[in-house]
Amino acid sequence: AEAPSNKIMVGHIGVGGQGGGLLRNFVGQPGGMSIATCDAFKDRREGKAKWVDAGYSKKMGKTYKGCKTYADFRELLARKDIDAVVVGTPDHWHVPITIAAAKAGKDVYCEKPLGISVAHNKAARAAIHRYNVIFQYGTQQRSNNTHCARACELVRAGYIGELKSIDVIAPNGATGGNPAPMPIPEGLDYEMWLGPAPKAPYCKDRVIGGGRWHIYDYALGFIAGWGAHPLDIAHWGYPHIPVEYSGTGTIPDKGLFNTIVNWDVKGKYESGVTFTLKAGGDKTTFTGTEGWIAASRGRATTSKPELLKTTVKPNEVKLLQDTNHYRNFLTACKSRKTPASDIDSAVQSDFMSHLGDIAIRTGETIKWDPK
């Protein structure tokens, strides 16, 4: 058994749908212990804390009631005994909480996508480096889906020849949403939920429905929200970002949701490698002079099936750190070594969705200086 002093004590900020899933994954890790939940919904933070206590009670064989609840994340961050936080809030809170956590000396696991602006991303990166804390981005395909690492290793080692193009597709966004104002549910601190976002009347589709993903005040939509996964794989296999972007897409003009759907972004890298980002699936395809390899959440495919059986040579890039993204974070918190999805890569891959979004909304060709 691991001594309590060797465990990473974790606080969870945002424990709803995605945040609740993260909580379940972290509670199962022997290297850490979840001791706090924070959420703008009272029933969520209290219900999840009871679930945590029950799980640890069963594991320890005695009653445990050590998981505390908070309505304000700043109170959680003030605790000296918390080593790390897991940020599973709506997107518009990701960067403000990440920066506050870094200032408080806490290591950070932040759900994807990262920020809601280029400036947000730069600010998060600056804070993580300034306060020298560990950061893990929630792109779990770098660990939990080992074939993604395999595909990127093969690309980097030149097994498909000279790289010529990277093509990314991500699930399309949503339209609709009922904007009619409704009474704020009992137990919800709506002002805290809104936080840095513009003031707006409460309605279910804004907060509990898809609004947190598809309203531009809170997110970029699925071009970033789901695009973060295949874009991350693109950056992992080719650690650069395009320097030119142009594209088309639809901005819904009815209903509550107003993030871009049906996007089609084209661009190119400084090296001349071409880039596309389209709506409609979930895959990253690398094409070279000697074949192609594609990675999705479910599998990797290639023009040369024998490639997937190739053993990475000692002098070639080895990308896979662990087969569990959450364990990888806790290990990094202890070792102080860079985890699988570091802040620099997170910022770069997230830039791609932002620059594509800007190109579509302005109708212009966007030039980007990577330096």
Image (tube, rainbow, N blue to C red):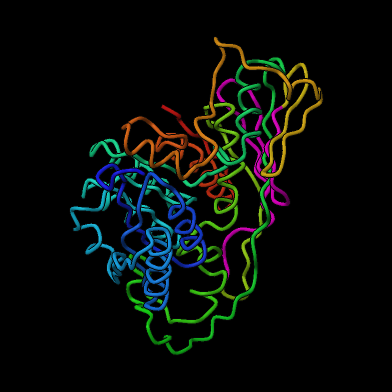
Position of residue 29 measured from the top left corner of the image (x, y, whole percent): 44, 48
The reply, left or right, for residue 260 in relation to residue 299 is left
Between 113 and 333, the one lying in front of the other is 333
- What residue is at 56 percent from the left and 58 percent from the top? 221
- What residue is at 48 percent from the left and 47 percent from the top? 138
Is 260 drawn above or below residue 16 in the view shown?
A: above
- What residue is at 56 percent from the left and 34 percent from the top? 244
Position of residue 171 measured from the top left corner of the image (x, y, whole percent): 68, 53
- The answer, for residue 371, to whether it is visible in the render is yes
The reply, left or right, for residue 358 in relation to residue 265 is left
281 falls in the magenta region: yes
Position of residue 200 measured from the top left corner of the image (x, y, whole percent): 41, 77
Position of residue 246 measured from the top left corner of the image (x, y, whole percent): 62, 41
- Label the magenta part by its dominant secondary structure: strand
Is 329 drawn above or below residue 370 in the view shown?
A: below
**Corner quadrant of residue 284:** top right
Is 106 drawn above or below residue 15 in the view shown?
A: above
Quadrant of the snapshot with the N terminus: top left
260 falls in the magenta region: yes
Residue located farthest toward the bottom when viewing the structure as drawn: 183
Residue located farthest toward the top when viewing the structure as drawn: 315
* Magenta residue span: 257-286
For the image, the number of numbered tags is: 0
- What residue is at 34 percent from the left and 65 percent from the top? 62
Quadrant of the snapshot with the C terminus: top left
Between 245 and 147, the one lying in front of the other is 147
**Corner quadrant of residue 130:** top left
